[in-house]
Amino acid sequence: MTLASAPVVAPSLSLRLAVRELRAGLAGFRVFLACIALGVMAIAGVASFARSLADGLAREGRVILGGDVAFSLIQREASADERAFLARRGQVSTAATMRAMARTGDGRAALVEVKAVDAAYPLYGKAALDPAADLATVLAPRDGVYGVVADEALFARLDLKLGARLTVGTAPMEVRAVLASEPDKLAGGIGFGPRLMMSEAALRATGLLQPGSLVRWHYRVKLAAGDAGDRAADAVVQAAHAALPDAGWDIRTRSNASPQLERNIERFTQFLTLVGLTALLVGGVGVANAVKGHLDRERDVIATMKSLGATGGRVFAIYLTQIMLLALLGSALGLALGAVLPFAIASAFSAVIPIPIEPALQPDELALALIYGLVTALAFALLPLGRAHDVPVAALFRSEVAPERRRPRKRYMVAAAAAIALLAVLAVALAYDRRIAMIFVGSAAATFVALRLVATLVMAAACRAPRARSTILRLAIANIHRPGALTPTVVLSLGLGLAVLVTVTLIEGNLRHQVSAALPERAPSFYFVDIQSTDGARFDAFVHAHAPAATLERVPMLRGRIVAAKGTKAEDLKPAANAAWVLQSDRGITYASEVPIGSRVIAGQWWSADEQRPLVSMEKRIADGLGVTIGDEIVVNVLGRNIAARIANLRMLDWQSLGINFVLVYSPATFRGAPHTDLATLTYPRGSTVADEVALLKAAAQEFPGVTTVRVKDALDAVGDVVSKLVLAIRGASLITIVAATLVLGGALAAGHRHRVYDAVILKTLGATRRRLLAAYALEYLLLGLATGIFGVAAGSIAAALIVTQVMNFTFAWLPGPALLAALAALALTLAFGLAGTFTALGQKPASVFRNL
């Protein structure tokens, strides 16, 4: 009775034989299992952690927002009608936030993020103070002096002690406690200075609340206990839009307490998921190599089964079952690690991460990661398995001297293509930004095709190379193009890993370059905010007296929110990714009779000095992203009024100049009579010393207590700190892919070990010395590494350029040092792995090889 006619159900027989072979151990599948486990762990862990963050944000939505519904206004307080509307909905708490300068008695000053609160604050949660005390009591006036609490950073910056006196604006304050935590901090975003919290009455006493001052007013509403659900909050929002359509306030509910934070989490989650998918794709090459190597080792078993009557389909089914069992095992390992990742992060970093984490097992996310792992294994295993279907028994026994090379049957190629297509569909359909996911899928496909083409070209070049006189060189070149050469697998493995390494390295370098190295020589040293219009001339004279050689640029500034464009409400617009930020909050706007410094009109005409119509000039890339052009109408809500203006021209801006740049610049008549303050920059001709900056900072704080001074270096340091954390996260996440690529490269070289042993034995028998063979193999790996390194650097550079320019919207600069260093590291790794396997091959005894020919 043959295997083909055995009276057993086919799937059962395939499973039994697959399991029986696995009893011999998993020695040839360590790379296979590691690659699948790494990719699945990354996807499962990232998705579970992101869901834990989302659950934590949802659970703490009221606390983060500070209420059930929050209404924000810029540059103005709510009117009596607006306050009455809010009071009818529930308990209202008022807070105001702005930047200001805090000064000590000896003249030191620091930029602070002021937060003024009323007696009802906080509606949810609790502000933690050190020493512990009631917030309202601490902030109340004592002996005519208001109390404040501050971040510990301000204590360190100004060398403060409890009880120290500060002056904010024109009012003295007493520092009475350290602000250990504030419940609604996440809703306000990240500031450039430490927090200084005071009472609303104290803020009014400072004299900082002038017409046009850049202060944001927050009104948090706590709904009645029976009306505190999401539906009731949404009803309040709809009622606000209906009753007060022109209020111009930014409204949030507890379900979107921090939209920017949620967007950042979703984007970072997508990035990490794509990293996991990249690790899986790189690991897929390891799967293909492992399957090919396994079938190569099992040639005698396959030949025996075929000689007993097993069909090619039965052989395929047996080994496919075996591979999928191993994929299931690797995925299970990855799922176990990924499932515990949120718990590990919550346990180790809960005190560092200022975001509520609610770790829990996420069955749907784990199931998706399992599908990714199994589909990846299937996609990359089908073609090697398919090739085994039609290999005759004689060819299997003669594979040492006459290896068969043929394409698998059409059905296996179609099945592999379908599995790859399913993987691509999952990656795009489940992505936060499908455009980025489609770019990733297209780039991955292009990279695989390009690497295969590179391998083909390298083999063709080696085949057509002139006959070398050196035996070592001739042997190295022959090894590159001979039948069964490692060239395709080494090029694919090394090329993928190197491309990822170069991409990450260049992204990291460009992020740092944007903050430090790309700082223009004539970047301003200071920004001055909230200069009262009536103090403009006096402020100019003050600056020219203290910095006569510096250049001062002062312009009017208001804040406005785009509420409609081209007749479409802002919430209904579908902006491009690089322009969406313009609609997410209020923006600085200005007016001018002449083209602003640093702007260049590229379409349309600038208005005349006596223009009376409401016209606006818009930044070209933002206009393209919003789908508007010259002649279209833009409606901006400023100080509670909707201002409509026609686009007269489009400008290009140099955002990296760090000068005064505005997306929207209006004709002067548009805002005639509107209260506003001025914004100014101060630029030294050849830079400035720290002593110059400190002296000017002290003098400005004393002479103009209501003007906020932002030192550009401090702002860049704050941004640099964020960038450093982002770079660390990118580097750590991408390490998974690089580890997978390293495993795949090692596996690819290990898969060719049997051929290396055969070659070494034959050549040594013919008189080749160990040193000559070692030199030939080293030269082979060096040539392969150089050819692949050129492609890896080019592909990684292109990928980094696309990500930096299209996703991050920065200018890309190619950094040859880091890119070439990454290439050299990959080349050294190839030589190390290749020669490590070669040493064992050269030590093989000839007898065992010759007996099996």
Image: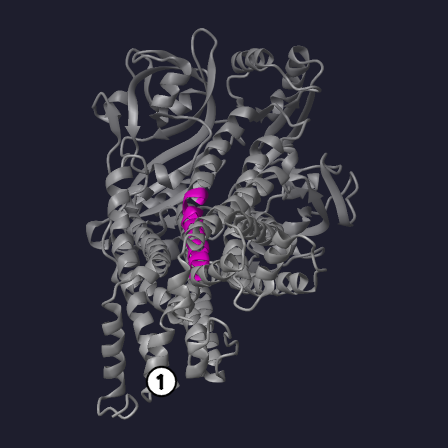
Q: Residue at x 42, y 60 (%)?
A: 846
Residue 784, percent from left and from top: 58, 54
Viewer-closest of 272 and 300: 300
Of all residues, the one furthest to the top in this rendering is 106
Q: Main secondary structure of the magenta part?
A: helix
Quadrant of res 319: bottom left
Q: Quadrant of the C terminus?
A: bottom left
- Residue for badge 1: 306
Q: At which x and y percent is residue 570?
A: 53, 56
Above-or-below relation of 815 to 848:
above
Q: Indicate yes or no whether the magenta region holds residue 741.
A: yes
**Along the line of sight, which residue is nearer the eye, 373 or 660?**
373
User: x, y (%) of residue 78?
Assistant: 42, 40
Q: Position of residue 734 (x, y in %)?
A: 44, 48
Query: Could you tell whether 426 is left or right of 570 in the image?
Result: left
Residue in the picture at 35% in, 72% down: 298
**Label 1: few (<14), some or many (≥20) within 10 Å?**
many
Span colored in magenta: 730-751
Residue 535 versus residue 318 in the image, above or below: above
Residue type indicated by callout 1: Lys
Left or right: residue 275 versus residue 801 is left
Residue 755 visible from this viewpoint: yes
Number of residue marks: 1
Rendered image quadrant of residue 314: bottom left
Element at label 1: helix
Name the quarter where the N terminus is drawn.
bottom left
For the point 63% across and 40% down, which residue is it? 816
